[in-house]
Amino acid sequence: MTLQRRFFALMFGVMLGAAMLLATFVAQAQRAVPLRIASLVPKSSLYHQQLLEIGEAWRPAQGEGARFVVFTDGSQGGEAEMVRRMRIGQLQGALISVVGLREIEPTIAALQSLPLLFRSWEELDFVREKMRPAMEKRFADRGFVVIGWGDAGWVRFFSREPALRPEDFKRMKFFAWGNEPEQQQIMKSLGYTPVPLETADILPSIQTGMIDVVPSTPYFALASQVFGTAKHMLEINWAPIVGALVVTKKAWDEMSPAAQQALRTAGEKAGTQMRQRARAEVDEATQAMVKRGLTVNRPSAEQMREWNELAERVHPRIRGTMVPPETFDEVFTHVKAYRSANPVKGR
């Protein structure tokens, strides 16, 4: 063999070895992809357990070295902070409500920010499924993949003092999400007093009197012990808490096809179970709090009319501020279609 042939043979061997090492490195890096998931949900809660089950399904599909870590109780900050952390790579995913999801895609606010719009879970499910394909595409365009949809119950008003009419709440200070200035402006324009805070601040703030009212689902009020100070609950279904598990497109693209499918399948299953369980817990959590001293205030028909009139005044202010006009109109179109196909006697 000539010197030149020996040189090319040697170079070919070196290049082949390097390629094999690179392939091994890439395969190992892909197997070791971490998924760090954050949420406000309490540790050991239904939602935490569902996230852990998703991890159990995903890890073997992704392969050796795959890590699935769940941060609960808001340890990674509020939902807006979680979205920021996902964008810079500190987190790969989060189970968050519309409060956080709207930081990614503003149109999602239409499912949670319209008071007294949805009369039943069936209406909400119908509207969400109608909007889901386009909504998920918009999330993907912004660099996030929706893995599964969930909800956490109806928002009720928990207050330190009894209140039944909209007017009753004007003398009280409301908890408001710190990253929703539009909502705060709407509340102020209607004569209410919002106090922007993070979730972790709710309990100490209600206990010290910094706030008087917490709009909350019964489950959260029970889990956080808010009801211990805010001993009065107004029983109206003000709005649903809608949420989703999302992961960054970067993390998604680093997964193997088998891991993507496992995550998608487990996420869909978990979303269904979260919705079913959360809806049952609205009544279960309320009953548990009543046994510990909570007073449930049920508005009369006249008082309920006042609340509906308030919602009707709020809706036009939300259109174009908290919810884009075209999305606002689309939601109302779907609600109207559902009610036309499913009339309720007496209405």
Image: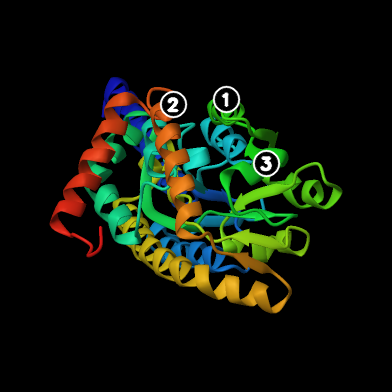
In this rendered view, identify the residue nearer to me: 80 or 88: 80
| Residue occupied by mark 1 | 189
In this rendered view, identify the residue nearer to me: 223 or 320: 320
**74 is higher (above) or lower (below) than 273:** above
Q: Amino acid at mark 1?
A: Ser
Give x and y (percent) for residue 270: 40, 64
Pair 1/3: label in front: 1
Gap between marks 1 and 3 measured at Cα: 14 Å
Q: Which labelled disc corresponds to residue 27? A: none
| Residue occupied by mark 2 | 317
Q: Amino acid at mark 3?
A: Phe
Image quadrant holding the N terminus, namely top left
Relative to 310, is 79 on the left or the right? right
Gap between marks 2 and 1 measured at Cα: 10 Å
| Residue occupied by mark 3 | 174
Q: Are marks 2 and 1 in contact (CB under 8 Å)?
A: yes
Secondary element type, mark 2 = helix
**17 is higher (above) or lower (below) than 282:** above
Give x and y (percent) for residue 98: 47, 42
Relative to 239, is 80 on the left or the right? right
Mark 2 or mark 3: whose residue is earlier in sequence: 3
